[in-house]
């Protein structure tokens, strides 16, 4: 909360606009701190603004629908803020939010980092961070697709489904395998998904491609819905478990940029138990 302001405020028209904006932010912060309407007296006390000054600014905000006045002398946040918030939410792009954190993660581990999303029974790679000057790498093509049960990110999405939907997926796809390590039986897949739910992390142990291992962490939106997976792909003998905290931290950073708030049971754990709609 901004530092209390002196109560001998002169008329706002003589003050620079920046000061008006600062006071407006202070008022909005106080209103945002409570669900119910707040009296002008309490608002004045909490912001340090003179009641007449707070009254003038609140009235102007009421005209713009940024503040509501349910009854004389009390105020709460208005619907205009919700409208603007929905506009911002609608313009949020998972790729835009992910790109810089992905590049930073790649800088730290020097291995390709992939962002992928679910489309039906497959994942599709939508972004990547890698260096053309690095040595041996496992680089996934943007737009490439792979079955859910054979990929680390795909397993995250299946882990977020309820058991009936997982069984329906297995029936539709037949759990076809690509390598000798592929999981092709439903009981084995269910055990793998249980591990992913418990840890918030999923793995591909040379199941899509021999010689390649992957680890993935989920990216969630403001409704705690799994919207993407962030994964590291590396030659099987190079995948380093010490990358895992960095991967989870980066996935959390992207999720936070999308409005996700971590729960008490871990930064991203627990949300995987929510079914995808």
Image (cartoon, rainbow, N blue to C red):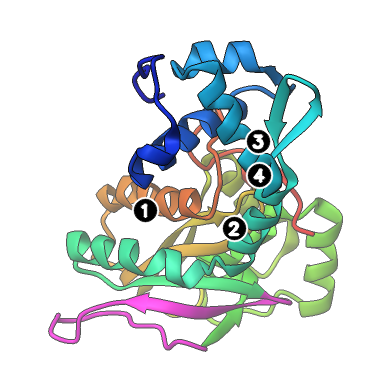
Q: Position of residue 96 (x, y in %)?
A: 44, 70
In terms of sequence position, does the residue under pointer 1 or pointer 2 come before the other?
2
Q: CA distance from mark 2 to mark 4?
A: 40 Å
SS class, disc 2:
helix
In this rendering, the label closer to the viewer, 2 or 3:
3
Q: Position of residue 102 (x, y in %)?
A: 33, 65
The residue that disc 4 covers is 66
In this rendering, the label closer to the viewer, 2 or 4:
4
In this rendering, the label closer to the viewer, 3 or 4:
3
Q: CA distance from mark 1 to mark 2?
A: 16 Å
- Within 10 Å of the Cα at label 2, are there few (<14), some (14-19), or many (20+) other Cα atoms? many
Quadrant of the frame with the N terminus: top left
Q: Position of residue 275 (x, y in %)?
A: 76, 51
The residue that disc 1 covers is 250
Tag 3 near tag 4, CB within 8 Å: no
Q: Position of residue 19 (x, y in %)?
A: 36, 38
SS class, disc 3:
helix
């Amino acid at each position: 909360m901004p530092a209390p302001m002196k109560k001998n405020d002169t008329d706002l028209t003589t003050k620079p606009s920046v000061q008006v904006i600062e006071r407006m932010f202070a008022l909005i912060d106080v209103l945002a701190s409570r669900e119910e309407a707040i009296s002008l007296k309490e608002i004045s006390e909490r912001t340090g603004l003179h009641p007449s000054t707070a009254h003038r600014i609140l009235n102007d905000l009421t005209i713009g629908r940024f503040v509501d006045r349910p009854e004389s002398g009390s105020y709460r946040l208005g619907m205009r803020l919700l409208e603007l918030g929905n506009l911002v939410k609608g313009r949020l792009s998972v790729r835009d939010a992910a790109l810089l954190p992905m590049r930073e993660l790649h800088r730290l581990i020097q291995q390709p980092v992939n962002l992928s999303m679910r489309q039906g029974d497959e994942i599709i790679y939508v972004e990547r961070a890698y260096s053309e000057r690095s040595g041996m790498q496992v680089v996934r093509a943007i737009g490439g697709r792979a079955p859910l049960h054979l990929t680390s990110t795909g397993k995250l999405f299946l882990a977020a489904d309820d058991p009936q939907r997982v069984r329906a997926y297995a029936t539709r796809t037949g759990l076809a395998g690509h390598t000798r390590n592929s999981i092709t039986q439903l009981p084995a897949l269910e055990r793998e998904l249980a591990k992913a739910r418990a840890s918030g992390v999923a793995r591909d142990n040379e199941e899509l491609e021999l010689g390649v291992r992957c680890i993935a962490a989920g990216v969630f939106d403001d409704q705690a819905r799994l919207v993407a997976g962030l994964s590291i792909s590396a030659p099987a003998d190079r995948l380093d478990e010490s990358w895992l905290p960095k991967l989870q931290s980066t996935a959390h950073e992207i999720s936070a940029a999308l409005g996700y708030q971590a729960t008490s049971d871990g930064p991203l754990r627990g949300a995987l138990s929510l079914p995808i709609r």
